[in-house]
Image: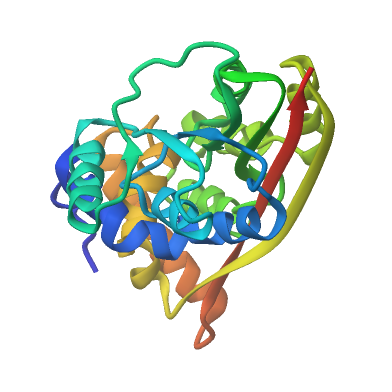
Amino acid sequence: MRFNYKSMAKTQKELAFLRDLIIFDEWTRRFTDIVDKHIDLSDAENMLYINAGTGNHAFAINERFGGKIDIFAACEDADTLTIALGKAAAIGADIDFSMLSFEDDAFDAVLADASFVRPANIGQFFEKTIGPARTDGDAAIFLPSAGSFGEVFSLLWEALFNENLIEEHGAAVERLIAEIPTVSQIKALAKRSGLVNINTQTAAEIFEFENGTEFIEYPLIADFLMPVWLETLDDNEKERVAAQLAQVIDAEDGDLSFRFTVKATLLTGEKS
């Protein structure tokens, strides 16, 4: 097998379509299902959704509460915004996707998707999320917590070792593990950012793949996660390590499927 890393690279527009067609159902929904179980917006008159993707969950919230909430949503980039606007027009959803910046103390509730936010940026993201909530308003953020991807990172370390790249890049894998915040760290960040009455909910989500090739070529991995995991490598090294990772997975699991776990965590609180 020859994994061509360059041929897998996607434009921002292609990534936006993948977010809409694949990533929401296979990744984001694992988090939003927890949101839907534990958040009640019936008393909110307005809400802000940060990192709303192509709008799927914002549309579901709008439908769930019968249009009683004025929903404002900010998309990650121009291409996801274009898709969200097209879908809103097609279904007649009254959601304002025009938000480019957010005034402080303006919303009864703020919900934010941090599932693709880099762990090193989580603290800043918390402040960005909590600021727009009014005093005593609700804020909620969902993201992976410590214990996520552990099965992948151990095999990634082995793949780097097999390709004689561990001395140069092994520390980067260690950072991938260490930087994912624990639930306690997430709570502490929320407290420092001005939240009180903080609660968390965590569900262990299992991702399963038939073999190593399916894993490294799956859009969630190849287009959204792997570019971050391998960002310290050059393109040739990325190809080598990705192909080696597939081989290590097959050698490790034999005829069994490969599974990894994500600890999907929802944090909620009130702005003090």
Q: Which of the pair 60/44 is nearer the observer?
A: 44
Is 190 placed above or below 15 here?
above
List the single residue furthest toward the top.
Answer: 104
The image's colouring method is rainbow
Q: Residue 4: image x %, image y %?
A: 18, 54
| Residue 157 visible in the displayed image | yes
Is 210 placed above or below 135 here?
below
Q: Which of the pair 170/53 is nearer the observer?
A: 53
**Residue depicted at x 37% and y 50%:** 241
Q: Which of the pair 191/139 is nearer the observer?
A: 139
| Number of numbered labels in the structure image | 0
Q: Residue 89: image x %, image y %?
A: 19, 49
**Residue depicted at x 26% and y 45%:** 84
**Residue depicted at x 32% and y 44%:** 94
| Residue 5 visible in the displayed image | no
Q: Residue 271: image x %, image y %?
A: 74, 21
Point out the image quarter for the N terminus. Answer: bottom left
Q: Residue 39: image x %, image y %?
A: 68, 50
Point out the image quarter for the C terminus. Answer: top right
List the single residue furthest toward the bottom.
Answer: 255
Is 253 placed above or below 66 here?
below
**Residue depicted at x 46% and y 37%:** 70
